[in-house]
Image (cartoon, rainbow, N blue to C red):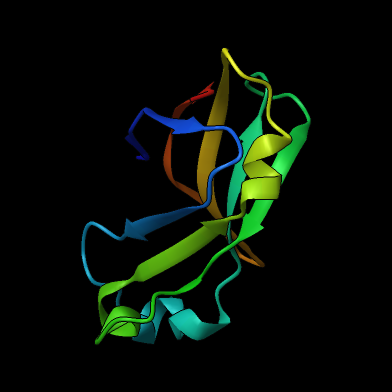
Amino acid sequence: MAETLDFTILRGCDYRVRMRLVAPPDITELGTLSGWHVAFEVRRTRGGDTVLSIEGTLADIPRASELGVFDFILSAAQTASLTERVTYVYAIRRSDTGYIDVFTKGQLNVESF
């Protein structure tokens, strides 16, 4: 089951969203993490169209591939494209053939400074 986490960002700012799997993955069963397709997806409503999708990469930290640590880099231009004072929904999901899964989800609040 997906973990739920709500958070707030400021429009026009850069962010690094880091996700770590709750338990280290069994790569004999799930394959190497470097081949995973993991994305941070933002939608205006649950089940609605995706308004922002960021591909994840293994984090640049020791043992990231053993622990399952991924980074999603949101640029200032990407966050500026979101509407302020709007609550979006997001999910971080894996979408490889045979492994469609949501790791975390929640509400993404957008504000201006």
Occupied quadrant, residue 82? top right
Side of 112 relative to 105 (left or right): right
The residue drawn where x is 63% and y is 36% is 42
Tell me the residue at 57%/12% (across/down): 85
**Residue that appears at 55% across and 65% down:** 56
Residue furthest toward the top? 85
Rendered view: 8 above or below 53: above
- Which residue is pictured at 69% across the width and 46% down the height? 78
Quadrant that contains the N terminus: top left
Q: Nearer the viewer, residue 112 or 25?
A: 112
Horizontal side, residue 97 vs residue 5: left or right: right
Name the one closer to the observer, 87 or 93.
87
Quarter residue 63 falls in = bottom left
Residue 8 in the image, given as x and y percentages of width and height: 41, 28
Q: Reply above or below: 91 against 33.
A: above
Residue 76 image point, x, y percent:
62, 48
- Given residues 14 and 35, the one toward you in this image is 14
- Estimate the x, y position of residue 24 in percent, counting from the top left: 23, 71
- Count of numbered marks: 0
